[in-house]
Image (spheres, helix red, strand yellow):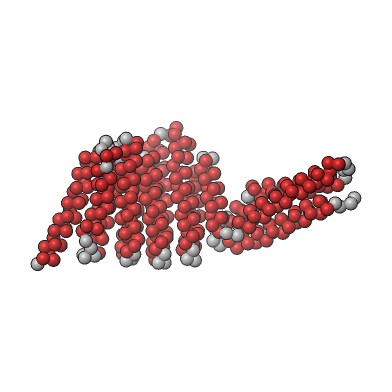
Amino acid sequence: MVITTGQALIALFLLLAGYVYLRQVNMVRKLEKIVPQASEIFSGDGKIRASFAVLFFSFACATFLSMCRGPLVALLEVGLFAVTLFVFGFCFGRMLQYSNPEFLVRRLGKIGLRECRRGHNEHVFGYVDIFSEVIVKAIRSKSMDLARVALEELLGLSEAFVPGEATHRMKEGAPTLLDRVNFFVAHFSKRLVWLFRYAVDEKMEPIAEEIISCYGKMSLFLTKFHPTLIHLPLLFIARAADIAARADAEEVFVRAGATLSELGKSLVATSREKNESMREAIFLVLGHLEEIMKESFKRNKELSPAILMQPFAEIAELLAEEQYKEFPDREVVITELRRCLGEFSALDLVQAKKAGS
């Protein structure tokens, strides 16, 4: 049997793809020190498997065409070669992507989301631990981009968990569902506090700030699902702020206050959009924000009370807009804001008297 040029080229592409695959297997094994289960993710990639199947099929077709004669054979060989070239290029690029730890982390996140959609939410706890391990290693190696990607995937997984539980546990009733979600939030938040403390200790303040923002996003998401779920994330934000204060991580501490302020405004906007009361959640945010502002003043007596009042004033300005006139619980929230602003105004007067004397 005579080997045609098409057969030879397709066989060459197949061998090259196999060579690259074996090299990437070794590369991915090394990356398991950073991303657990990296080898399993690589070997289970459906797109790479499908590409190899197409390459093998192309070689079989080329072999069959080499035994045929006719005016269309040459045209079919050209078309087959074009398809093979395209598939090889795709397969080659896909395999090379696995050299990047960030790509592996995103793939791991997609696998975790797939588990949620299938109702295997019990596996999510394991993925939270895996992502936490990745973030620790990223902090240790000072890889901010990898840590940010892992945090994004971790947050996405937590947001997928809640509707997944709601779908698959509807028959068990709301109390069982809320208990399950609260258990997950506690597990998730403990991991974030651990990561936050480690980031602060390693002087990776940008990552610590990202973790604070992660808390804020999660709080808003959980409140939209059920207002009572905001308690745990807020407690952990306050705990993270305390850790930052003790470590003299001033920028991180300020970020905690800014996150609570933005969360308060987001809750007000959500309450107006849904036309339902979120008074308890808003009051919790204001209470934690007040504590953080007071702690800021204790740490720096020279701090202007006007700066301390700013987060509360921003929420008050939002409520003063025309579109928020019909906001549920508007009056009681404004009353609480006036109380907070009044306390810091009194502090301003005390400071002014001391300066005058």
Q: Which residue is pictured at 42% across the width and 42% down the height?
A: 180
What percent of the width, then of the height, locates residue 161?
46, 44
The answer to whether residue 248 is above or below residue 97 is: below
Viewed as shown, does residue 306 lie left or right of 211?
left
Residue 28 visible in the shown view: yes
Viewed as shown, does residue 197 lie left or right of 328?
right
Q: Quadrant of residue 269?
A: top left
What percent of the width, then of the height, locates residue 115?
53, 44
Q: Which residue is pictured at 40% across the width and 52% down the height?
A: 214
Screen quadrant of the C terminus: bottom left
Q: Which residue is pictured at 41% across the width and 57% down the height?
A: 210
Residue at the extreme top: 171
Instruction: Say how many tags the image has.
Output: 0
Q: Which residue is pictured at 30% across the width and 55% down the height?
A: 257
Q: Nearer the viewer, residue 37 or 322?
A: 322
What percent of the width, then of the height, locates residue 52?
71, 50
What percent of the width, then of the height, locates residue 328?
27, 37
Residue at the extreme right: 1
Residue 64 visible in the shown view: no
Q: Nearer the viewer, residue 173 or 118?
A: 118
Q: Nearer the viewer, residue 269 or 77?
A: 77
